[in-house]
Amino acid sequence: MEEQTFQVDAEGGALRVLLIQPEGALLEQAPCLVFLHEGLGSIGQWRDFPRELARATGLCALVFDRPGFGGSGPLQRPRDGRYLQREDVGSLGAVLDGCRIASPILIGHSDGGTLALLYAAQFPDRPLGVIAEAAHVFVEELTLAGIRSAQRDYDAGPLRKGLARYHGGQTESMFRRWVDDWLSPEFACWSVEDRLGAISCPVLVLQGEADPYGSRDQVDSICRRVSGPAQSVLIPGCGHAPHQQAAGEVLEAMRRFIAGLCQKEGSAAIPMA
């Protein structure tokens, strides 16, 4: 397993990218796993999960920090209410183009899952498949209550200290942007449900049944509205980060889904069992 970290130029600045390459895997000749982090996330906060999934599938994995997160450059423009729909979709496109990835399999957690869905809706012919973990497609009071709780934890200190290990000098602006976006009165009616019908690639939707940031209604909405095949996995007793809290189960569910994508595509086979 080889790893390298580099930068990709995007509109407004450079993005930090981590490439994980299993032995014998070729980045430009097979599907590539592309990981999209959560609303307070970064490359490092995925921990070892991208490596484990790359090892299980034999595919290359790309993990990157979106603008204003981790080791990437700052977000150049203020948000304009179109949450995840301009800077972040553009940064994902810049990474795919800069790394010459023709067949991405998008794997997004929380806001990253929403971003994966939005990209697949805007560019339906590009992703081979989408894995959306704990994604949001409309605003729920449960989500807002979770964000208010996170705000209290941040103001108390421990959450701020933990995030600063990954985001350094961008921690404050990154966190306040996330809170202000979600809790603004203008955001109360935010929804991307009307865009989901444009998604034609296969979609796997995962969520913990005890997720404090979203209900099963999010999963049902995605599966009901996408045009392509969709399947869901609900994990009992699991919270907002199933890839950490139920890593073995999530790894196997993703591996089987990816194996099906690769077999359909005619790529190097990943054992289904």
Image: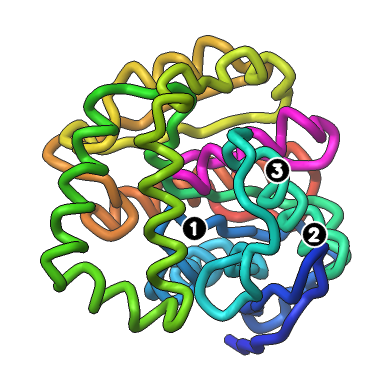
Q: Is residue 160 left or right of residue 229?
A: left
The earlier-in-sequence mark between 1 and 3 is 1
Looking at the image, residue 212 lies above or below residue 176: above
Pointer 3 local density, CA inside 10 Å: few below 14, some 14–19, many at least 20? some
Per the image, label 2 sits on a secondary structure element best described as: helix
Say which residue label 1 marks.
Answer: 37
Q: Residues within 10 Å of mark 1 (few under 14, many from 20)?
A: many
Which residue, given by chain and number where applicable, does mark 2 sit on? 96
Nearest the camera: 107 or 174?
A: 174
- The residue that disc 3 covers is 263
- Are discs 1 and 3 less than 8 Å apart at CB? no
Q: Is 267 situated above or below 213? A: below
| Side of 190 relative to 259 (left or right) | left
> How much space separates mark 3 and mark 2, taking CA atoms?
22 Å
Question: What residue is at 26 percent from the left and 37 percent from the top?
Answer: 213
Q: Is residue 120 magenta?
A: yes
Q: Secondary structure at mark 1?
A: loop
Q: Measure how far apart labels 2 and 1 are at the Cα level.
A: 15 Å
Looking at marks 3 and 2 on the same chain, the residue that comes earlier in the sequence is marked by: 2
Please, what is the three-letter code of the amino acid marked with disc 2?
Leu
Magenta extent: 111-132
Residue in front for this viewpoint, 213 or 156:
156
Q: Residue 225: give its label.
A: none
